[in-house]
Amino acid sequence: MKIVTWNANGKFSEKFPAILEKDADIYVIQECENPEIINLKEYSEFSSNYYWVGENQYYGLGIFAKDNVKLELVDLDDKGLRYFIPFTVNDDFNLLGVWTNPDMDGTKTIYYPKEITKYYEEHKDSGFFNEDMIICGDFNCDVRLKGTHAKNVYEVIEKLSECGIVDIYHHLTGENEGEETTPTFYMYRHLDKPYHLDHIFLSSDKVKALEIGDADKWLQLSDHVPLIFKI
């Protein structure tokens, strides 16, 4: 099975044909429109099997899958945390789509991965979190942002290790947090402002391949590049 996670930076209904070349079974897309409000035949066909969550109908988190993939939403209270979509795939494994975009106490804090550890703590005893699951998306998570943010990054890694899953990019490359040679995000689309904000967590023995999109191509569409992996 092939899975793609990508922050489309808005207007995904216009951009989605570009990601179709990856021919994935599941697409985890951040900053995308709610298919219910888009009157485009092609986007409706692409969105025939999906879940979406968001407050702004044009900038939410969506999970899109081929019609032969069974998605079943898991009923977990998000406790006001934004944005998470927990679901099972083909009655076989759990997948959590993530876009950390908190609006806690009325103020929007962009680079704030602590929502992931809060979500984990709320639901770690539910049975949803286990060594057979996958978590992927835009974590807005990079230790180069320093301070409390860096501390929160390491906390995410530590907490998720409790259920036997690891950050696959760092596992495969052996690179340390903050020393990634392949960025996933370029602030303002500037090549000299690279960060590694997008992450995939799963058991280290389950990933078969990992690809990170080429900046020269994808920065024409978004400030993020897609991550493509096979299990």
Image (tube, rainbow, N blue to C red):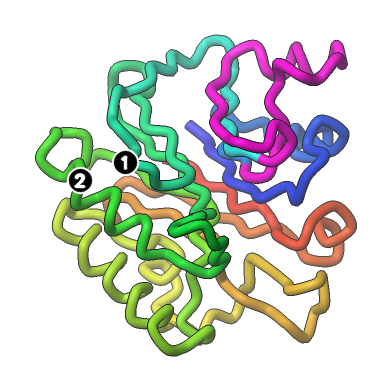
Task: Report the label total.
Answer: 2
Q: Earlier in the sequence, mark 2 or mark 1?
A: 1
Q: Residue at x 42, y 64 (%)?
A: 113
Amino acid at pointer 2: Glu
Relative to residue 18, is residue 127 drawn left or right? left
In the image, farthest residue toward the left = 125
Q: Are marks 2 and 1 in contact (CB under 8 Å)?
A: yes
Three-letter code for the amino acid on which mark 1 is drawn: Lys
Which of the 4 quarters of the picture holds residue 30? top right
Residue with the mark numbered 2: 122
Q: Nearer the viewer, residue 106 or 49?
A: 106
Q: Residues within 10 Å of mark 2 (few under 14, many from 20)?
A: some
Q: Which residues are magenta?
A: 30-59
Query: In the rendering, at what x and y percent does residue 187 appear?
Result: 74, 74
Is 59 on the left or on the right of 118, as rendered?
right
Residue at image point 63% right, 66% down: 184
- Residue 76 placed where, x, y %? 28, 30
Front tag of 2 and 1: 1
In the rendered view, tell whether residue 222 sits above or below residue 82. below
Q: Residue at x 75, y 39 (%)?
A: 19
**Magenta stretch: includes residue 81:** no
Label 2, secondary structure: give it. Answer: helix
* Left or right, 83 with reference to 46: left
- For residue 39, above or below residue 80: above
Q: Is residue 40 left or right of residue 142?
A: right
Residue at coordinates 53% horizontally, 69% vertically from top-left?
A: 111
In reply to whether residue 54 is colored magenta, the answer given is yes
When the figure is inspected, residue 92 is found, relative to residue 41, above or below; the finding is below
Q: Position of residue 177 (x, y in %)?
A: 43, 81
